[in-house]
Image: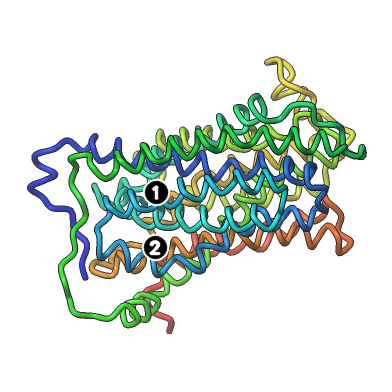
Amino acid sequence: MEATVEKDDLEKQSVWLPMTLAGSMFFILGCITWLNGAITPFLQQMLELSPLQASFIISSFYIAVTVAGIPSAMLIKRVGYKNGMAIGCAIMALSALMYIPAAKMQMIEIFLFAQLMIGVGQTVLQTAVNPYVVKMGSERSAAVRVCIMGLLNKSAGVIVPIVFAAVVVSGVVNEGESLSQAQKDMMANSLIAPYMAIAGLIFLFAAFAKFSPLPDLVFEEEGQTSKGEVKEALSHPHLALGVIGIALYVAVEVIAADTIGSYALQLGIADYSVMTSYTMGCMLIGYAIGIALIPRFMSQQNALVMSAIAGIVTVFAVVLGDNESTALANILLVPFGGPQLPDPLLCIALLGFANAMVWPAIWPLALDGLGRLTGTASGLLIMGIAGGALGPLLIGIGNVAGLGAQGAYSLMLPSYLFILFYALKGHKMRSWK
């Protein structure tokens, strides 16, 4: 099957209409995805979970990609990208409603199942919307369009933890103190109304995707089986390595965004639930710079090289930093009314800046020249999001295995080294020989 944008549709309608649809989808993806960073330490405290147990809250969300990646690609080919967006939103909305019985019964098992199912919904949505953005214009400027989508996605990541803290987090005691059952009930009940609102909002986005008059990606039958397409797609080294790169990137992205709250909780930081906003804020700055520089002043490849190097340097700063020092915060935050945060904690947030251009750069590099295999390749790249399940688990395991909460972040280094390899050589490979 070959995915192409119908020229007549694109001539009749401005590209801004599909960009508006795609932007709304990326915003809702950001709301759901980056809520994990706020709710994980919240549930960790409410349900009295260990750091390793808390990591399963994030991992269950991302492991859904392994199950739903290829089925999502098959679904999109059957129903189209626009309908796929609507279906993905509908699954997420229904899954959000499952948080209500989970909160009522205060059972981690139901929370994990709800996380798994909402992850399935976001996988369907990701599979539909990412290639839509890449293919709606020139591949040379694809990273810029993905950057614009990223700005919306990460903007949600800045806003959602702050709203979550204002609406949900209240009366939370400091780390080390035991919660009474009354306090646990209060925390659990505070989740119900927000998740009902989230479900309603996502249903509105589903309706927008379904009924908005916009061009779709359409497929021409080629008579190949899905299994054959997967094998053929993976025979292209730059795609196969790109899938690995996406998996490793999402692992470090999730570590930076979703474990920073748990690390802050361990340090006794009162506003642990808003820490994800700092990481997302740094990513927004990175996306804005990417939009300004690519492709006029910097190629997608060079942006990826610089991102990998910045990630390596920042990881060393996290691991070797002094938790008693607030030197960075005194320079970057305090003059603007911000808090005095420990240097390693702020460096975790700064990883957001290093990560910003990795996703926008890998996607067009990995899809380059694949033609009719683009749909299947996109599904494979989306499966790479499953790397998000590995990242928090590595940090949790490293914590209990003797590296400590801070030293565990050294496990991010191999990911950035592989991304550097892909930027320098991997994306150019057209043969395994």
Camera-nearest residue between 76 and 211: 211
Q: Amino acid at mark 1?
A: Ala
In the figure, 129 relative to 243: above or below?
above
Q: Residue 215's x, y, as percent?
A: 18, 46
Q: Position of residue 246 (x, y in %)?
A: 51, 60
Residue 269 locus on image (x, y percent):
82, 32
Q: Secondary structure at mark 2?
A: helix
Q: Which of the image's four quarters has the C terminus?
A: bottom left
Q: As shown in the figure, which amino acid type bears the numbered disc 2? A: Ala
Q: Secondary structure at mark 1?
A: helix
Query: Label 2 belongs to which residue?
Result: 366
**In the image: residue 310, left or right of residue 397:** left
Q: Residue at x 71, y 54 (%)?
A: 108
Q: Is residue 124 above or below residue 36?
A: below
| Classed neighbour count for the residue bearing mark 1: other residues with Cα under 10 Å, few (<14), some (14–19), many (≥20) | many
Residue under the image location 10 percent in, 50 percent down: 7
Badge 1 or badge 2: first in the primary sequence: 1
Residue at 29% over, 51% down = 132
Q: Can I make out residue 213 in this image? A: yes
Q: Which mark is residue 90?
A: 1
Badge 2: few (under 14), some or many (20 or more) residues near its Cα, within 10 Å? Answer: many
Q: Position of residue 103 (x, y in %)?
A: 67, 44
Res. 38 image quadrant = top right
